[in-house]
Amino acid sequence: MTDPLPPFILFMAGALLVPFVTGKWKSFFLLFIPVLGLLNLLRMQEGVYWIVSFLDYHLVLGRVDRLSLLFGYIFHIISFIAILYALHVKDDIQHVAGLTYAGSALGAIFSGDLFSFFVFWEMLTVSSIFLIWARRTEASLASGFRYLLVHAAGGLCLLAGIVLHVNQTGSLSFDYLGLNGPGSYLIFLGFGLNCAWPILHPWLTDAYPEATITGTIFLSAFTTKVAVYALARAFPGTEALIWIGAVMTAFPIFYAVIENDLRRVLAYSLINQVGFMVCGIGIGTALAINGAVCHAFNDILFKALLFMSMGAVMYRTGKINGTELGGLYRTMPLTCIFCMVGAASISAFPLFSGFVSKSMVMDAAAAGHMRIIWFMLLFASAGVFHHAGIKIPYFAFFSHDSGMRPREAPVHMLLAMGIAAFLSIFIGVYPAPLYSLLPYPVDYVPYTAPHVLGQTQLLFFSALAFTLLLLSGIYPAEMRCINLDADWFYRKGARLFYRLMAKALNPINEACEQLFVNGFVRIIAHLSKDLIARLALIIMVTFWITTGLRGQRLRMKKENLYADVMAGACPIGIGAGAATGFLALVYLLMY
């Protein structure tokens, strides 16, 4: 048997071949890539592979351990599901971008050095942006450019941090870093931007809802989860992450509750769920790290399931706002059921995947006597049930009757949603196989009476609160509006800065333009146009006058000399004189 290949190679090579595969074989080819990749990954043992010498350093393209393997497994699984969901797409750009995006994520998590990691990190940005632009709308174009600018800034921050870190330590190894110098802080910030930390987060809620229907499935799986992996690898136990993660779990709830675009609701919900992972990494205990990466595994599945169900609704109706949907359970019952499975999973209902992972993080906070953090996570758990567990299925499939009677989603979409739903239920019912893959040994038992009873009470009281608020008219109504997010401040600030700079610097710029461009430079340009000819005329006319040349003959000689010089042809006498003068100058300089 041949040795295993670097996981990213199969996806990158497949992406290059996509345009050359046509007809019915394209679907089989696309699905075969993640299947082959998973078989290749299953053959890998823990260790270090594919070491490449670069300058004075060794680049490690394959550092295989329990942490990277866990993310490798789920990235292959979600790639298969996303490709199956997107089989109806005829746009090769989307297929190429999706495979390259998945390959870049795999390259990043298996990189054992910071340089390789950075290269794949930037490839994530470049490939994912085409999944936004591929929608080919004005809004997607604008969101894509903003996405590119934000991630380019984050990439530069990460690169600067890597350079400073290597200069300080002399090592490119991508292992535990901790916050111990300017380089590590810049790396920390670079990871945080891709993690959608508070205030830095609007790129996600702006771009993901503007991506293509199928592109959003890829986007929800890779960028933020690679950042979670990077934090778990380099900054476990960093106290700042506890508070950052706790705030991430809480603040998106307020935006999601009042948001009308249901894909944007899920984008806010994604930040909320990543917050649990970040908080667990910050706590840093074995239970907390296990809970964080376990929840990342589960979140990729149930968040993709929710995005797929909303994508199916959007595919059949062309609409995604809660004010324009409702009553779709009549003609899209399977999509409705799959959406409810995703809603139950993200809400951490017992017997669904979110329950067996989210509770690990909360118990880790409780074990560390972090009362405020635990209450914030508890509030966030209730809040996510409001905006993702109830709001998404309620306004899309129930609520008022929109009058639309679309067909059920295509078979391949239903199969993709069915696989994600099955895995979400299977993991929730029997979490032992997933627990066996976690970085640390697991002795955690999620199904105890206090866990089940406490979570069930929380969910039922949340449902009661939603019902009472809705019936009383207090619950925020679905409205056609634009909600102001944190980016409003720096968008307005940037515009104000631009106006101030325009008023302060534009007069100086105009004065410099008049003095230099329209004045000095124009004169120089005018003179330099025929400077050689003018110098030749000065010399020769002086000579001709001294020899007694006058009148019409002098005028003709001047015109002829000017024309010859401008045409690049000099009289023999002038050329000889110039050559003699040049040689004389050289002689004087030498002696």
Image (cartoon, helix red, strand yellow):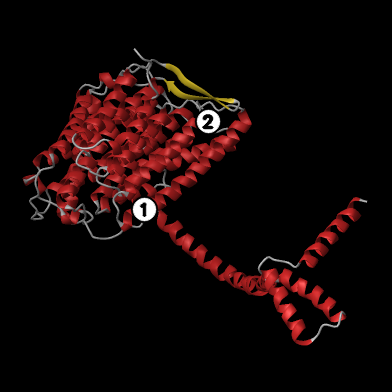
Image vertical order of residue 313 relative to residue 47, above or below: below
Q: Position of residue 321 (x, y in %)?
A: 21, 54
Quadrant containing the N terminus is top left
Q: Position of residue 193 (x, y in %)?
A: 44, 43
Instruction: Name the residue at 19% across, 49% down.
Output: 314
**Residue flagged by tag 1: what amino acid is it?**
Ser
Residue 242 x %, y %: 43, 35
Looking at the rendering, which quadrant does residue 568 occupy? bottom right
Which numbered marker is on residue 143?
Answer: 1
Could you say which is closer to the camera, residue 85 or residue 164? 85
Q: For the residues carrying marks 1 and 2, which lies nearer the camera in this image? A: 1
Distance between the alpha carbons at the discs numbered 1 and 2: 33 Å
Res. 250 in view = yes
Q: Indicate whether 567 appears above or below 473.
A: below
Q: Is residue 457 left or right of residue 60?
A: left
Identify which amino acid the numbered label 2 is placed on: Gly
- In the rendered image, which residue does mark 2 sit on? 178
Q: Residue at x 48, y 29 (%)?
A: 234
Q: Is residue 461 above or below residue 316?
A: above
Residue drawn at x 8%, y 55% as measured from the top left: 403
